[in-house]
Amino acid sequence: MDYYDPMPHTYRLLTAALAAALLTASAAAGARPLAAPHKMPRASAAQEESRTAALDAEIFYEILLGEITTRSGDPGSGYALMLEAARSSNDENIYKRAADIALQARSGEAALVAANAWKEAWPQSREANRYVLQLLIALNRIADTTEPLKQELTQSAPHSKTTALLALPQLYRRASDKTLAAAVVEQALASDLNDPDAGAAAWTAVGRMRLLASNKKGALEAAERAQKFDPLNEGSALLALELLDQGEVQAASMAHQYFNGKPTPALRVIYARVLVDLQRPAESLEQLQAATREKPDFAEAWLMQAALQLQDNQLALAEAALEQFIALVQAAPAGQTSPLGMTQAYLLYAQIAEKRGKFEAAEGWLNRIDNVPDIFNAQVRRAALWARQGKLTQARALLQTLQASSPEEERLKWTAEVQFLREAGQYNEALAVQAQAVAQFPDDNDLLYDQAMLADKAGQPQTMEHLLRQLIARQPDYHHAYNALGYSFAERGIRLQEAKQLIEKALTYAPEDPFITDSLAWVEFRMGHSVQALQLLESAFKKRPDADIAAHLGEVLWSMGQQDRAKTLWKEAQKLQPENETLRETLKRLNVTL
């Protein structure tokens, strides 16, 4: 029987496994004399050489043993040995390795001990300071980060200082106490806030920290201070746009000032998205057109431009913009374009064909979509086409067979089915389907709002009022709910003073919204204030040439004896939106034929 000794084999495996780590971890220890942590009495060259050799051997052994124990499943012991080796050698690489072992073992406190020891031994080490700063934030010891943050910023090179400042909100994003984090950052940046070179970036960083802490007013103040340092600063402009997107309307003047200058086309596109969210599509389109003039090869801007032109029923212009987009995509190098963009283009082409009544052509565009993640949206659009052709049963069946791969897709199925039923005038059935959607997504305020609107269409005003008041209680700044309730009262000619108060409340949250201005005008008209109503409606229609607003403006003009002007306006609105329900009802009620 052969005798097998496992020890040499185990030793060889350990040696092989540790070779790479040892070469890295002990490179500094073996490549140069190690700095002694304490002053030593003078000794002869021979004694010094002997002592250094002994120390090198001891440190090497600690490193070796630390790596072995760490890789053998005992990182605690490995960490202790490595930290001892670091203290004995005063070597930065070994301090770092000790901290890394603790991090791998998910022991943040131990890693911080190693990082603090490293920083104490090497006070000016930027890497040691960064370890301390990041570990303090990870451990949620935000109040202790002021000094490490100051040091990090002090050690930043002048050319990279702005980048370092703007990265701070991301660094502190996971802090549990965002208000404290904002205060700490502001304290650390005290000297930068008055620096002509760094002031704009510093105030932008403070503003973003305040925004993280949900202090919108404070963020707006910081953005204004940043803009005073540099009116053309992109960081403060982006902060203003984010504030504007979150309903801080006073940021609009800042954005307007910046975009009156020479912003980059990329920023124009960002601004355009915000303007769309704010129900200001005409201004959004202006920004996109400016972006494509300044950068004709900006494919994304052409695509967004097409979508807005389609929304305004400018079909020929939308088609021309899509042609520009397709040409740019086809000319781009392989791998530099997104299939999603092409899908959106095909969907827009399909909608253009649908609006022209060319349903077969619309189906042809949808058939071009072969990217698997986008097929769901294509099928939803196909169902919409069928519904438009009166094939409502088939359209609903197609939706119900679609397998949603996410909550967003499931929500889209519900909203699409409700829309089909609504367009078919089946309001009670649409309300029933909407109630099922709300039950599936009980926290979705937009779905609750749509349920209230359908209740109104179904002739259930009390249900609508109940749902809207429930929504206001859940989200007091949901301005659409105030506007809808006020407009409902005005439309029925009841509780007009309360209706006006509700709509004025909505305007405090969205003062630039032309549809809310339209609602206020309608209340004034119902109260007999035709002149005030006319002024408001003309202002709203100038901002947004929409058929709903045109219907109301025309009725006010008609009541004031300006029938010719009213008819001209209605004809214009009919060309823009020939199927608009409000316009059709107005013309029928007034017995007007265009």
Image: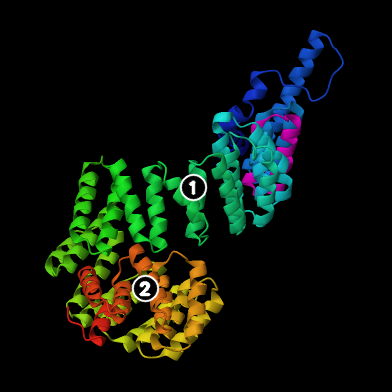
Query: Is mark 2 in CB contact (under 8 Å) with mark 1?
Result: no
Q: Which residue is mark 2?
A: 534
* x, y percent for residue 43: 84, 11
Residue depicted at 36% across the width and 63% down the height = 543
Query: Dot 1, crowdedness within 10 Å: few (<14), some or many (≥20)?
Result: many
Residue 230: % across, % down:
53, 39
In the rendered structure, find residue 237 and report the number of the disc placed on it.
Answer: 1
User: Viewer-proximal residue, 281 or 358?
Assistant: 281
Residue shown at the point (67%, 18%) measured from the top left: 32
Looking at the rendered image, the disc whose residue lies closer to the viewer, 2 or 1, is 2
Region rendered in magenta: 102-127
Answer whether residue 97 is visible to the viewer in this image.
no
- Classify mark 2: helix, strand or loop: helix
Q: Is residue 227 left or right of residue 527?
A: right
Q: Could you tell which of marks 2 and 1 lies nearer the N-terminus?
A: 1
Q: Residue 566: where, in percent of width, then height?
A: 25, 75
Q: Residue at x 21, y 65 (%)?
A: 351
Label 1: which secondary element: helix
Q: Quadrant of the N terminus?
A: top right
Residue 558, above or below 369: below
Badge 2: few (under 14), some or many (20 or more) residues near its Cα, within 10 Å?
many
Of residues 9 and 215, the one drawn nearer to the viewer in this rendering: 215
Horizontal arrangement in the rendering, residue 260 relative to residue 240 (left or right) = left
Rendered view: 142 above or below 533: above
Q: Residue furthest right?
A: 41
Residues under labels 2 and 1: Cα distance? Answer: 35 Å
Furthest residue in direction top, as rendered: 45
Residue 574, how many percent across, how many down?
21, 72
Q: Callout 2, which amino acid?
A: Leu
Q: Residue furthest front?
A: 561
Q: Main secondary structure of the magenta part?
A: helix
- Camera-side residue: 371 or 392? 392
